[in-house]
Image (cartoon, grey):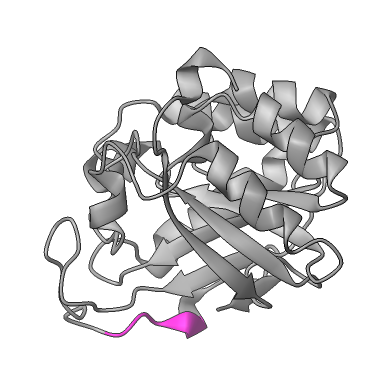
Amino acid sequence: MSSGNGGRIIYDISPFTHLDYPGKLAAIAWFAGCNMRCMYCYNSDIVFASEGRYTLEELLAFLQRRVGLLDGVVLSGGEPTLRDLVPVCREIKALGFDVKLDTNGLKPERIRELVEEGLVDYIALDYKAESAKFGYITGSSQYLRFSQTLDYLIGIGFDFEVRTTVHADLLTPDDINAMMRRLKERGYRGTYYLQNFVETPQNIANLTKPSRDFDRSGLEEILPVEWR
């Protein structure tokens, strides 16, 4: 593997899911570390981790035992594109698995590399917020890099989905409508997936249940919307 992939960079492995990769039975590799600090993130242990439990070699050994039992592998985190994914994706594809990437889009050059080499089959791109709230919610000033990834995937007609986590104290129906309009203006025609904030014992900003319900009736019919 590449020199940028040394050590136990896989925080954990979920051996089976039928929910995280549409239409496929898959395993999930959770990569340690992230370049965002999203307020509602319940994977704070993964986000702040410098290493995990498994090396890439151990992940591949696990997947070799799942050949014929699973259809695909989800690369999630944390943020998997912090790592050089090309070598491991080559080996995952050689085993016959499809690859799904969960990403915040801040590494457009790495995403382009994976796509152009045919090493990823499906992408879930997190649209955290429009530019005015992006930094506040994510702790990152790199909205432009997310935009570059979004425009690239739309421009080449790649098979991907856009999804947003909704906490009613952070994002309003007007915010979501503005995000849908921006997506449509850029050429996105797929389903826009909205995910309710789930209260957990800990998250990065120690958020609790929103002070008000999110008013779904305030959403305009701009794009097909599906709640998860």
Q: Is residue 86 above or below residue 31?
A: above
Magenta span contains residue 215:
yes
Q: Residue at x 42, y 68 (%)?
A: 173
Q: Is residue 168 left or right of residue 225?
A: left
Magenta segment's dominant SS is loop
Q: Is residue 224 left or right of residue 214?
A: right
Magenta span contains residue 32:
no
Asked whether the viewer can see residue 102, the reply is no
Q: Residue at x 20, y 81 (%)?
A: 209
Residue 115 screen position, x and y as percent:
78, 30
Residue 59 screen position, x and y as percent:
58, 48
| Nearer-the-camera pick, 198 or 211 | 198
Q: Residue at x 82, y 53 (%)?
A: 97
Toward the top, the furthest residue is: 3
User: Quadrant where the C terminus lies?
Assistant: bottom right
Residue 12 screen position, x and y as percent:
43, 57
User: Quadrant where the N terminus lies?
Assistant: top right
Q: Is residue 95 above or below residue 191?
A: above
Toward the left, the furthest residue is: 206
Number of numbered discs visible in the structure rendering: 0
Asked whether the viewer can see residue 93, the reply is yes
| Nearer-the-camera pick, 171 or 222 | 171
Quadrant of res 113: top right
Residue 31 screen position, x and y as percent:
45, 45
Q: Residue at x 56, y 30 (%)?
A: 147
Q: Magenta span covers which residues?
A: 213-217
Q: Is residue 107 left or right of residue 22?
A: left
